[in-house]
Amino acid sequence: MTPLSRVVIGSLLILAWPAAHAADGQKVFTQGGANPAAMACLGCHGADGKGIAAAGFPRLAGLPAGYLSKQLHDWRAGSRKQPVMEPLAKALTEAEIEAVSTYLAGLPGDPSPELRRQQIANDSVTRLALYGDWRRQIPGCVQCHGPGGSGVGEHFPPLAGQPAGYLAAQLNAWRDGSRSNDPNQLMVGVAKAMTDDEVTAIAEFFARPARQEVKP
């Protein structure tokens, strides 16, 4: 084989790898992993990966691959607990985790609502979402999770449009210690400083459909 032939074959393999990797990820999502315990994701998270709000199953489509991969590894390690996801994550191989995370990140997600900081926060829930309560060391949710709760990078996932039941469950998991996988334990402190009513209200606030922008 000539050097030129090796270069051509190598180039073709490189070009073909993303498509094959996406196919592997789609297979895990739609059919599950090689281990029967690694069930298909779409059964809970919907055929489009946008979740099932009525059941409290969150959207995965369009979330960063790094974030999705980290959550699966955290379920395997026990720093995040959930009776369905823990055994499922442990049954996936490293290659399957990488493939399905990359596949889900490439799926289209719903557009996030734009929530202007100039809006008048006439109620306590909106004030908490936008500006927080620094007397209790609670930053505004959007200060970390981006405008409208649309998400920022791999460490601050989107809140907007996720089911209220899911969001409330995560806040309560940080409060009771069954979830402890946040950077610098930031969410642990925030969640523990919130009241039960605030947990419910903030979850419902971000679960609502996109709100119309209010001009100042």
Image (spheres, rainbow, N blue to C red):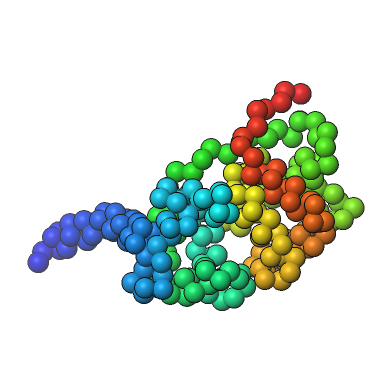
Q: Is residue 136 left or right of residue 34?
A: right
Given the current orientation, which residue lies at the most extreme top position?
Answer: 215
Q: Position of residue 171 (x, y in %)?
A: 70, 59
Q: Is residue 137 left or right of residue 156?
A: right
| Residue at left offset 17%, top offset 63% | 6
Q: Position of residue 95 (x, y in %)?
A: 38, 69
Given the current orientation, which residue lies at the most extreme front position?
Answer: 54
| Residue at left offset 48%, top offset 71% | 89
Q: Position of residue 117 (x, y in %)?
A: 74, 35
Quadrant showing the C terminus: top right
- In the image, residue 74 sits, relative to residue 191, either above or below, namely below
Q: Quadrant of residue 77?
A: bottom right
Given the current orientation, which residue lies at the most extreme left position?
Answer: 1
Q: Nearer the viewer, residue 1 or 47?
A: 47
Q: Position of residue 211 (x, y in %)?
A: 65, 32
Q: Nearer the viewer, residue 172 or 77?
A: 172
Kindly tell me whether residue 212 is visible in this rendering.
Answer: yes
- In the image, residue 137 sits, relative to residue 87, either above or below, namely above
Tally the marks: 0
| Residue at left offset 80%, top offset 52% | 197
Quadrant showing the N terminus: bottom left
| Residue at left offset 58%, top offset 69% | 82
Kindly tell me whether residue 63 is visible in this rendering.
Answer: no
